[in-house]
Amino acid sequence: MKPSKSEAALPANGLYGSRVPSPRQQQVIALVARGLKNSEVAEAIGSTEYMVKNHLRIIFDKLGLWNRVELALWYEARRHEGLAYKDDRAMA
């Protein structure tokens, strides 16, 4: 039986998916977790909406997530644990 997407992405330490998001992806995660739309995220990072969608696709794949809600919950859980990215405090 093939493991679920989330099970397949869990590393031994359980903190992140199979890979750690890049600094740009970390920015996108923090902004999406704040509830921004793709167009708003694109404007905030100086990119296009297409690139934001591409970042999100890669992020979901890296972390074993399916949607923005799961991403926001994943981010908040790490923020609550003190594991969120340092840059997001400056954006809040």
Image: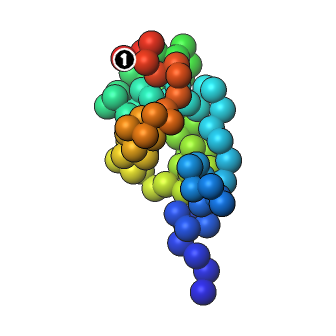
Quadrant of the image for the C terminus?
A: top left
Picture coordinates of residue 32 (x, y %)? 40, 32
Q: Is residue 61 visible?
A: no
Towards the viewer: 23 or 55: 23
Residue 48 picture location, percent across and down = 54, 23
Q: Quadrant of residue 20?
A: top right
Residue of label 1: 92
Query: Residue 74, image x and y in percent?
Result: 43, 46
The way the protein has been coloured in the rendering is rainbow
The number of numbered discs placed on residues in the rendered structure image is: 1
| Residue for point 58% across, 32% down | 25
Type of amino acid at the residue the image marks with label 1: Ala
Residue 1 spot, x, y in % from top left: 60, 86
User: In the visual, does 38 lie left or right of 64?
Assistant: left
**Residue for point 57% across, 56% down:** 14
On the image, which quarter does residue 80 sit in? Answer: top left
Q: Residues within 10 Å of mark 1 (few under 14, many from 20)?
A: few
Q: Indicate the secondary structure of the residue bearing disc 1.
A: loop
Which residue is depicted at the point 63% across and 26% down?
Answer: 23
Q: Does 74 appear above or below 22?
A: below
Q: Is residue 3 visible?
A: yes
Q: Which residue is located at x 53 percent, y 72 percent?
A: 4
Q: Is residue 43 above or below residue 72?
A: above
| 3 on left or right of 72 | right
Q: Outermost residue toward the left?
A: 35
In the foreground, 67 or 20: 20
The one of 84 and 23 positioned closer to us in this rendering? 84
Q: Nearer the viewer, residue 30 or 68?
A: 30
Q: Is residue 11 above or below residue 72?
A: below
